[in-house]
């Protein structure tokens, strides 16, 4: 008699259904696992045998062959412990085969039969629903995450013995009911009202937040670059449910979901140290995992001390910044991870940090200043929409008791601008290769995501604006990319002002955020 239980593998960010076949074979007692398993799957033999015995059941003294199909898909991780154990119990005659019909089973077993946390539960649950499964057995701790996928009965399993009693009809496990608790407010360590001075930098960050634009803060040490960047999450707009599910899926696969947080409701803010490797930043490994740029999807990637990052590390970001995805290719195949992040970088203008400072003299030779600034390549700088200088704050502003505008007030303006953009980029008709127009959902959710077709449609200039842009193109030596990025930025500034058309004042503000010419 062949026992068959269905489980799931995670390839990249997608779940792939795995059929766990268990059968007896001729030979000495042993458990043989085939179907391209890795070391963690091979080790499940000992875990499963001990867990079945400790659940009060007899483990068959036969040669047992476990096949994980399809054999071409590499199986990694301990998530197959529970389905293998269930297959052995069915094969031994303790449970009927139809007890696991229309069911997906995942979970790691401890030696005493307790079912432990498994990474990647969200994409697995999505795959279960997509393939028509009615219910899913998951570790008890992962049930809130699996329940994010509607239309699927989630059974939280505490131990193998509890699951056996449930399937045997002795003591049923109640399906998990999602919590309806209100969303916890975002904790922001610094409110914009507490940052003294720097009004034009706050304005630049407001524009960056409203349109999802990349931003570079340049200033001397102690001017407040890091403080301002870390205050940015307090003015970011709320994520939609679709964005939350996208981000949660990446964190689930990377096994970085915070405890007790099945769904990430607030935009990620990632701040890796400059010693990070390029694989740590964009993802990689023998079995590729998401990197920091994917973990910052729909949120902010903050790179402090920007020139201190390795040149190779920074250059690998160029393609993801344009395409909003990163593709990692290995000999065994390619995987694509989403990476639609907003880059906020901070740097000193030179090695000593005081080039151009009105108070403290710079001690660097001109050639060293140029060399330091050129650690950031021109193509990378061209992908940053907003370049802003952060001056030192004078004593009067620092000692003043007067508070600035609160993060909440700024966030309300940002949220209103994003709502305008959502309405603009929602489901709309676009010409397709066929004879008729077809309703398709746009991947563009903010102005920074706009492609050339959207820029042409939504960023039209009047005659004054055309004249201003023409002179700016020649004076600033703008590339085609720079031209389109200025138009996107001007569109965001117009959205913050509630203007339907881009005025010359909006364009002028966008132009002042272009980088100043470096020494050379």
Image (spheres, helix red, strand yellow):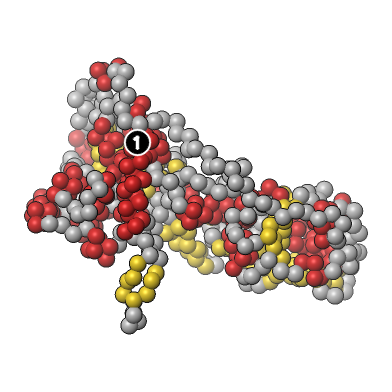
**Image coords of residue 267 (percent x, y):** 45, 45
Residue appearing at x 40%, y 66% in the figure: 441
391 on left or right of 295: left
Residue appearing at x 37%, y 75% in the figure: 438
Q: Is residue 191 above or below residue 209?
A: above
Residue appearing at x 89%, y 60% in the figure: 59
Outermost residue, bottom side: 435
> Element under label 1?
helix
**Image coords of residue 26 (percent x, y):** 87, 74
178 on left or right of 115: left
Figure label count: 1
Residue appearing at x 26%, y 18% in the figure: 395
Name the residue that disc number 1 marks: 409
Q: Is residue 217 above or below residue 86?
A: above
**Image coords of residue 343 (percent x, y):** 36, 46
Residue 134 in view: yes
Q: Quadrant of the C terminus?
A: top left
Quarter of the image where one finds residue 228? top left
Residue 381 in view: no
Q: Is residue 200 above or below residue 28?
A: above
Residue 153 or 10: which is nearer the viewer? 153
Quarter of the image where one finds residue 153? bottom right
Q: Quadrant of the N terminus?
A: bottom right
Q: How many other residues sit within 10 Å of disc 1, few (<14), some (14-19) or many (≥20)? A: few
Q: Is residue 499 above or below residue 450?
A: above
**Image coords of residue 21 (percent x, y):** 76, 71
């Amino acid at each position: 008699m062949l026992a068959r239980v269905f489980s799931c593998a995670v390839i990249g960010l997608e779940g792939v259904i795995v059929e766990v076949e268990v059968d007896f074979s001729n030979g000495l007692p042993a458990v043989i696992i085939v179907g391209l398993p890795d070391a963690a799957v091979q080790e499940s033999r000992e875990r499963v045998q001990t867990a079945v015995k400790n659940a009060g059941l007899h483990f068959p003294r036969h040669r047992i062959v476990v096949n994980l199909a399809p054999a071409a898909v590499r199986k990694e991780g301990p998530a197959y412990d529970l389905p293998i154990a269930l297959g052995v119990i069915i094969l031994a005659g303790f449970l009927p085969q139809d007890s696991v019909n229309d069911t997906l089973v995942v979970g790691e077993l401890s030696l005493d039969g307790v079912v432990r946390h498994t990474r990647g539960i969200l994409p697995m649950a999505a795959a279960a629903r997509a393939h028509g499964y009615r219910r899913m057995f998951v570790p008890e701790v992962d049930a809130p995450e699996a329940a994010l996928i509607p239309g699927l009965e989630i059974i939280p399993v505490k131990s193998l013995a509890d699951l056996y009693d449930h399937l045997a009809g002795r003591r049923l496990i109640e399906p998990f009911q999602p919590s309806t608790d209100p969303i916890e407010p975002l904790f922001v360590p610094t409110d914009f009202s507490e940052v003294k001075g720097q009004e034009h930098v706050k304005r630049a960050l407001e524009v960056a937040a409203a349109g999802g634009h990349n931003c570079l803060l340049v200033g001397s040490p102690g001017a407040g670059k890091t403080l301002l960047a870390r205050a940015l999450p307090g003015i970011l707009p709320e994520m939609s449910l679709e964005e939350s599910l996208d981000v949660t899926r990446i964190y689930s696969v990377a096994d970085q979901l915070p405890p007790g947080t099945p769904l990430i409701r607030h935009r990620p803010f990632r701040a890796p140290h400059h010693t990070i490797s390029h694989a740590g930043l964009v993802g990689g490994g023998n079995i590729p995992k998401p990197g920091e740029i994917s973990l910052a999807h729909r949120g902010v990637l903050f790179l402090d001390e920007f020139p201190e990052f390795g040149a190779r590390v920074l250059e690998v970001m160029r393609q993801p910044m344009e395409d909003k995805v990163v593709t990692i290719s290995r000999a065994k195949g390619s995987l694509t991870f989403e990476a639609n992040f907003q880059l906020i970088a901070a740097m000193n203008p030179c090695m000593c940090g005081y080039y151009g400072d009105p108070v403290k003299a710079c001690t660097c030779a001109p050639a060293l200043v140029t060399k330091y600034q050129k650690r950031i390549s021109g193509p990378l700088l061209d992908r940053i929409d907003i370049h802003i200088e952060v001056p030192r704050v004078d004593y009067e502003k620092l000692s003043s008791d007067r508070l600035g505008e609160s993060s909440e007030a700024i966030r309300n303006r940002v949220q209103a601008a994003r709502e305008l953009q959502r309405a603009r980029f929602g489901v709309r008709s676009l010409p397709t290769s066929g004879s008729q127009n077809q309703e398709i959902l746009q991947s563009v959710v903010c102005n920074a995501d706009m492609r050339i077709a959207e820029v042409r449609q939504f960023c039209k200039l009047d005659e004054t604006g055309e004249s201003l842009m023409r002179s700016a193109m020649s004076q600033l030596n703008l590339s085609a990319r720079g031209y389109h990025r200025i138009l996107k930025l001007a569109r965001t500034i117009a959205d913050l002002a509630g203007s339907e058309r881009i005025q010359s004042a909006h364009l002028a503000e966008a132009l002042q955020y272009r980088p100043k010419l470096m020494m050379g």
